[in-house]
């Protein structure tokens, strides 16, 4: 794994996020905040969970510990969520831009909120962040589809084809 690979994965991550966030603007407020049977609740809760995971991992990578919990209620509208997400995307891209291939094998040591000490390799943790987003984007995409606002195909191959044809 090299930094170019990681940047490509995060380009895909943000492309897929944008497809969801753009369609989240098209649902009603009631749909945006409605509960659902997914682990983090409905559309808003699921999207906020993806954002919070990425944000907290970036802080961990930078040695800044954990930030305050991002609660879904602070994102009353999809526009507020999208704005916060853009800020996080810029921060993560800035972090990635400062990395070299040799940085990717450094250890990330941290203590979980439950007190467990962990030691991870940076590139593996970065891949985890993107993979985690993929899992929960699928849940959000299912909800958007149920609401008649499918984000369409958000597979990596579709992104790669779009990049090749751009």
Image: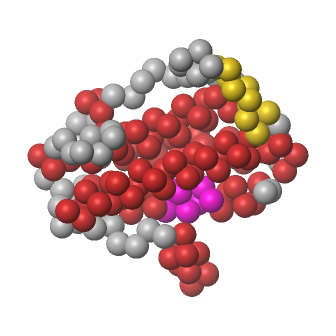
Q: How many marks are shown on the rendered structure?
A: 0
Classify residue 2 as left or right of residue 155: right
Magenta segment: does it hold 13? yes
Q: Which residues are magenta?
A: 9-15
Residue at 84% x, 50% y is 101
Classify residue 33 as left or right of residue 16: left
In the displayed structure, 62 sits above or below 90; it is above
Which quarter of the figure is the C terminus placed in? Answer: bottom right
Residue at 68% x, 33% y is 61
Residue reaching furthest to the top: 115
| Rendering coords of residue 6 (x, y %) | 70, 55
| Rendering coords of residue 74 (x, y %) | 29, 29
Residue at 71% x, 46% y is 124
| Rendering coords of residue 55 (x, y %) | 52, 35
Residue reaching furthest to the bottom: 165
Q: Nearer the viewer, residue 25 or 120?
A: 120
Residue at 35% x, 72% y is 152
Q: Quadrant of residue 48?
A: top left
Magenta segment: does it hold 28? no
Answer yes or no: is residue 153 visible: yes
Which quarter of the figure is the N terminus placed in? Answer: bottom right
| Rendering coords of residue 11 (x, y %) | 58, 60
């Amino acid at each position: 794994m090299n930094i170019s690979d990681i940047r490509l994965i995060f380009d895909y991550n943000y492309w897929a996020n944008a497809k969801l966030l753009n369609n989240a603007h098209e649902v009603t407020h009631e749909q945006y905040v409605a509960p659902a049977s997914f682990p983090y609740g409905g559309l808003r809760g699921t999207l906020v969970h993806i954002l919070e995971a990425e944000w907290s991992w970036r802080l961990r990578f930078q040695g800044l510990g954990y930030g305050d919990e991002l609660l879904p209620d602070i994102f009353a509208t999809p526009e507020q969520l999208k704005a916060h997400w853009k800020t996080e995307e810029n921060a993560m891209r800035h972090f990635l831009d400062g990395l070299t291939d040799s940085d990717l094998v450094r250890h990330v040591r941290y203590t979980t909120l439950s007190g467990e000490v962990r030691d991870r390799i940076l590139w593996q943790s970065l891949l985890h962040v993107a993979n985690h987003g993929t899992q929960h984007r699928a849940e959000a995409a299912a909800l958007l589809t149920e609401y008649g606002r499918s984000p369409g195909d958000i597979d990596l191959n579709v992104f790669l084809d779009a990049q090749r044809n751009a």
